[in-house]
Image (cartoon, rainbow, N blue to C red):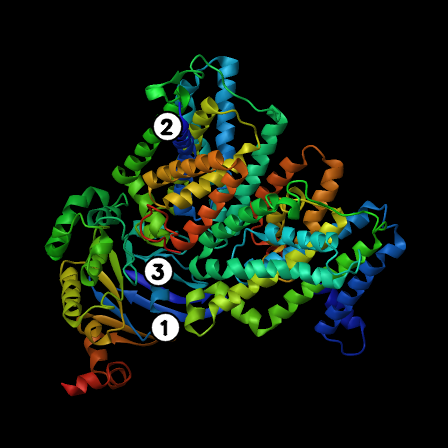
Amino acid sequence: MAKYPFNILKSLIPTKITQNQINIYIIIAVIIGFATVPFFIDVDTSYFAYYLFLTFLFIVIAQGWNIVAGYAGQISLCQNSFFGLGAYTTGLIWLYDVTKTGYYFDPVVMLLSGLVPVILAIIVGIPLLSRLRGDYFALGTLGVQFTVTVLMLKGGAFTRGADGLHLPSVAFESMLPYYWVGLLLALFAVAVVYFINRSNIGLALKAIREDETSAASRGVHVLQYKVFAFAVGASLTGIAGSLYGIYLFHINPDSVMNLNWLFYPILMCVLGGNGTIMGPIIGAFALAALLSYGDVYLLETHPILSGLIIILVMKFMPTGIIGLKDKILSRR
Amino acid sequence: MLEVNGIDVFYGDAQALWDVSLSVEEGAIVALVGSNGAGKTTLLKTISGLIHARRGEILLSGKSLSNLKPQEIVGRGIIHVPEGRRLFSSLTVLENLKLGAYIPRARPFFTESLERVFSLFPALKTRIDYKAGSLSGGEQQMLAIARGIMAQPKLLMLDEPSLGLSPILVKTIFELISALNEQKTTILLVEQNINQALKIAQQAYVLKTGKIVMTGRGDELLANEEIRKAYIGERVSKR
Amino acid sequence: MGEFGIIIQVLISGILFGTMYGVAAIGLSLIFGTMRIIFFAQGTMIIFFAYICYWLFTLIGIDPYLSLILLIPISLLLGMGFYYGLFKEAAALEQKEVSLLIAIGLMWAVENIMTRVWTADPRAIVTAYTSWILRPFGINIPFTRLIALLIAVLSAIGVSLFLKRTRIGTAVRAASEDMESTTLMGINPHWVNAVTFAIGIGLAGIAGVGLATVYSFDPMYGFTFVIMSVIALALGGMGNVFGALLGGIILGLIYNLTAYFIDSTWANAICFVVFLLVLMFRPQGLFGGAAQKV
C-alpha cells in the first residue's frame, strides 16, 4: 500500500495514530466492504459476484502455493491433486452421508476435506522431500498428480470414474452462502499466511528457501519444516476444493483435478509476487478477472490470450506486481 | 595493474564488504588473507564479475570493469580459479584444459599453454584422458590452476588453493605458485593459510569482517606481532 | 500367429513408438541440463512441426522425409529465437517458476493457436509408403515406424557427436554440470543456453516428422506427449543422450505390455508409478551419470 496517502492522512488527524493502526483500519474496512456487497447487489444474478466468489477461491489456492513455494521455496506440481481430493472428500462424505448432518456448509466436512490432502501430503511429502531437491522434487509431485488423477478415474464404484459424483442440487438455491463462505475462507487463508510469516516457522522457512544447507547446519530441521509447509499448502488447497465441489455439484477428475488447478496457483503467485502476503491476493484478483471477463468478452481467443499474457508478464515482470511496486518505490 | 577502489558489496540487504580498496602490480604476487567468512571470496567474485559492487569501481590497466559481464572480464584477462576447484568432473582432464582456453584470446596459444601446463604439472600429462572427477585432491587442485593458466591470464586469481590438501601437497602448491610468478604471471592469492601465503607474497592485505584492516609487504606482515598472535598463533613459537 | 507372436508384436511396436518419446526426452534433457527447467512445451512443439510437415505435404507435395531438409534448419533457428525472445531474462533469475510458466504459457498459446487455425480435427499423412508393412518372421513392422526409429537413432548419434566432439558441445556439457564455472571460462551462458535450446527444438522438429508419418495427431496431444517424454527422461537419466533414447524405448515397452495385459488407463497409471519409483529410488535414472548438482 502506498505510503503517500497515509502521510497526508496522518497530517490531517490530530491524535497520534501509527502506520500499523491505519493498516488495520483499512483491512477491517475492506473486509466489511466485501462482506456487505451482497446487500447492494443481487448475488445470484450478478456476474460481478461470481467474479468475487472466484477470486476468494483463488486467494485460498494461491496462498496454498505461496506457503510451499513462496516461503519454503519448493515447487509443487500437484496442487490440483489436493484440490481434487478436497472436492472428492466432500462429495463422498455427502453421498455416503458419513457425518449424518445433511447437505450443509458443515465446517466438519470442510475440515475433513482439508485433512485428507494433508495425509497425502505427508505420505508423499516425506519420501519426496527427503530425497529430491528442487526440480526433481517438482517432477516427483508431477508424478503424484498423475497417479492421483488416474486413481480417481479408476476408483470404480467408489469414485464413479470419469463421470464422477453427482450431488443433488436442491441443497442450495442461492449464491449467498457460497459468497460468504468463500470470503471467510479467503480471510482464513490470508490469516494463516500472515501468522506463518510472523512466526518462527516463517523465519525457518525463509532460511530454508534462501540457503538450505546453511539452514541445516544451523540446526533447522529442514525436512520437518518442508513437510509442514507442504501439508499446510495442501490443506488450504483441499478446503478450497471442497468449496468448489459444493459449488459445482458434479465432481469428476476433469472438473476438479484438471491441470488448470495446477497452473493457476503458480500463475497467481508469480503474477502478484511470490513469498509475500499481498502478492497472491493481487494475483487472484487479476487472474479471476482475466478468466471470468475473458470468457465473456474474448470467448474464443481467451486461451491464446492467456498464454501470451503469461509469457509477456513473465518476461517483463518476473517479480510480480509487488516486485514492480517495490522497484518503483525504491527509485524515489 | 588491477585497482579496486572503495567498493561496497551487498548480499541482498546484508553488507559484505565495506569500502575495500586494493591494488595489484604487474608481475607481483599479492596475498589477501583473513579468516573464514571475512569476505575474501566475495571480493574475488566481485572482481571477476559474478557479483556487482554497489559502490566503488574496479579498474584493470586503468579501464573500468564496472558494467562488464563475467565472461567479458575473463576476456580482458582476469582469470578466477574458484574456491573448491569447481572442475567439470564428468569431463576429461584434456577437455577441462580445452575449456580453459576457450576464449578467442587464448585459443591460438593452446599448444603453448598446454606445454607450459605439462611442464609445471607433469602428473596431469599422464592423466590426460581421465575424467576430472577421478583425480586425487591434489591433482584436482593442480588441474584447476592449470585450467586457469590455459586462458593466458593477465591476472590469475586463486581462491584458497591449499584448502583440504595434505601438508606436503600444500608445500608443492605454494612452490608452483611461486614458479608461476617467476614466469611473469601476476597473481592475486586468497588464502586462509596465512603463514605460507605471506611467505611468498610481495604485497598483502588483511581482510576482517569485510574491511581491509592492514596492508604491507609480505615479510613485514609476517613479522608483525598482531598478525602472528591473531592468525598464526602457537605454531610459530613451537619451532 | 500364436500368443507368443502377439507379444513379440506388442514389444516391437512398443519399442518403435517409444523412440518418439526418446527423441523428445533427449531435447528435454539438454534443456534441463543448462536451464534447469522442464520445457513443457516440447510436446506441443513436436505437434507444431508435425503440422508443418503435414501442410508441406498436403499443399505443396513435399515428401515428409524430404521436408526434414527444410524443417531441421527452421527448427534450429526457431529454437534460438525462442530462447533470445522468451527465455533469456528468465534464465538469469533464481526463480525457476518464471521459466516454467513461460514454457507453459508458450504451450497454451501454441496449442490454442493451432486449434484455432487448423481446427481440432486429427490429421494424418498418407503417402505411398505409409501403409507399407514389412513382415520379417511373421511380425508386422510398419515401414514408417522403422524409419522413425532409424531417424531417432541417427539423431541421438548426431547429438552425441556434437556434445563430445565439438567445442560448443563440450561447453554445453560443462554448463550442464556447473554454469557458473563455465562463465568463468569466458563462455557466455546465454549463448550456451541458446544453442542447447536450438538443438532441443531441432529435435522436436525431427520428432514431429517422425510422428506425422506414424500417427494421427491433433493440437492438444502435445501435453500428453511431453508428460510421457518426461517419464522417459526420468527413466533414462539426465545427461546421457542414449540413455534418454533408451528410456523412451523402455517406457514404450512398459506401456504397451501393460495395455495389452490389462488396459490402457492402467498402462498410464503404471507408467506414472514407475516414474515416481525411479525418482525416489534412482533419481539419476537407469543410465544417468553422476547425480546432478542441485
Label 3 sits on residue: B47
Query: Callout 2: helix, strand or loop?
Result: helix
Dot 1 surroundings within 10 Å: few (below 14), some, or many (20 or more)?
few
| Residue C48 on image: x %, y % | 51, 29
Dot 2: chain letter: C
Dot 2 surroundings within 10 Å: few (below 14), some, or many (20 or more)?
many
Label 2 sits on residue: C149
Q: Which mark is residue C278?
A: none
Label 1 sits on residue: B37
Query: Marks 2/3: CA distance?
Result: 51 Å
User: Taking B111 as reference, is A22 above or below it?
Assistant: below
| Residue A13 on image: x %, y % | 80, 73
C58 relative to A217 in the view: left or right: right
Q: Are marks 1 and 3 on the same chain?
A: yes
Tell me which corner region of the image, top left, top right, bottom left or bottom right, holds residue B237.
Answer: bottom left
Tell me which corner region of the image, top left, top right, bottom left or bottom right, holds residue B123.
Answer: bottom left
| Residue C1 on image: x %, y % | 40, 22
Tell me which corner region of the image, top left, top right, bottom left or bottom right, holds residue B29.
Answer: bottom left
